[in-house]
Image (cartoon, grey):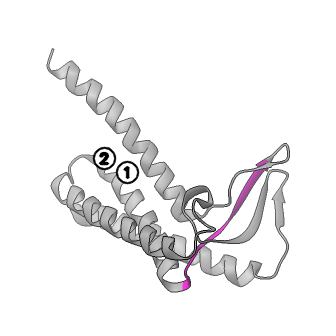
Amino acid sequence: MMWRWLLLSGVVVALDQLTKYVAVAQLTGQPPVEVTSFFNLLLVYNRGAAFSFLAGAGGWQRELFTGIALIASAWIIWLLYRHPQQTLFSLALALVLGGAIGNVIDRVMIGAVVDFLDFHAFGWHWPAFNVADSAITCGAALLVWDGIFAGSQAKNNHK
């Protein structure tokens, strides 16, 4: 049963890498492409983590973030092995795993993460992101949801 969660992670990685490949091929050297009044396609190479955290550091952050992602991935695989029957929990972990691996591939292959989705409103731009970042965010939100409702469900079962 764990294999279906690993397959989902693999689909996230494949979709992430495919969209990054297309973004690099189509957006290199191009100005932002306005898709809607609040969404652009814009090629950005992020050497940092979320919100470009430590992007300006001297290069050591690449190994740090890669190491953290690999350790987290190993831990997630162990959790998927232990809890494959917990559907929401495993779905969330599979999304985070796929996103983490997608971004690790970028860090190892090119030294930075390819971001290209740029949302904005009222002159304010959300930091550019990618499919892997979206999967990580959705997975994290599902983990919080599962933690809140699985915890309250467990309390109700003990009453």
Q: How dense is the environment of label 2, judged by Cα within 10 Å: few (below 14), some, or many (20 and up)?
A: many
Quarter assignment of residue 42: bottom right
**Within the magenta stretch, is there residue 4?**
no
Q: How dense is the environment of label 1, judged by Cα within 10 Å: few (below 14), some, or many (20 and up)?
A: many
> Magenta part of the protein: which range?
110-120
Mark 2 to mark 1: distance in Å? Answer: 5 Å
Query: Callout 2: helix, strand or loop?
Result: helix
Q: Residue furthest front?
A: 58
Secondary structure mainly formed by the magenta segment: strand
Q: Residue at x 70, y 84 (%)?
A: 25
Q: Is residue 29 above or below residue 124?
A: below
Residue 5, image x, y percentages: 30, 61
Q: Residue at x 30, y 52 (%)?
A: 90
Q: Is residue 18 above or below residue 116?
A: below
In this rendering, position of residue 110 left or right of residue 10: right
Residue 38, image x, y percentages: 80, 50
Query: Callout 1: helix, strand or loop?
Result: helix
Q: Quadrant of the N terminus?
A: bottom left
Inspect the image, locate mark 2, and give the three-letter code of the amino acid beneath it: Phe
How many numbered marks, from 0 up?
2
Q: Which residue is mark 1?
A: 92
Residue 106, image x, y percentages: 52, 78
Q: Quadrant of the C terminus?
A: top left
Q: Which residue is mark 2?
A: 89
Inspect the image, locate mark 1, and give the three-letter code of the amino acid beneath it: Ala
In this rendering, position of residue 100 left or right of residue 126: left
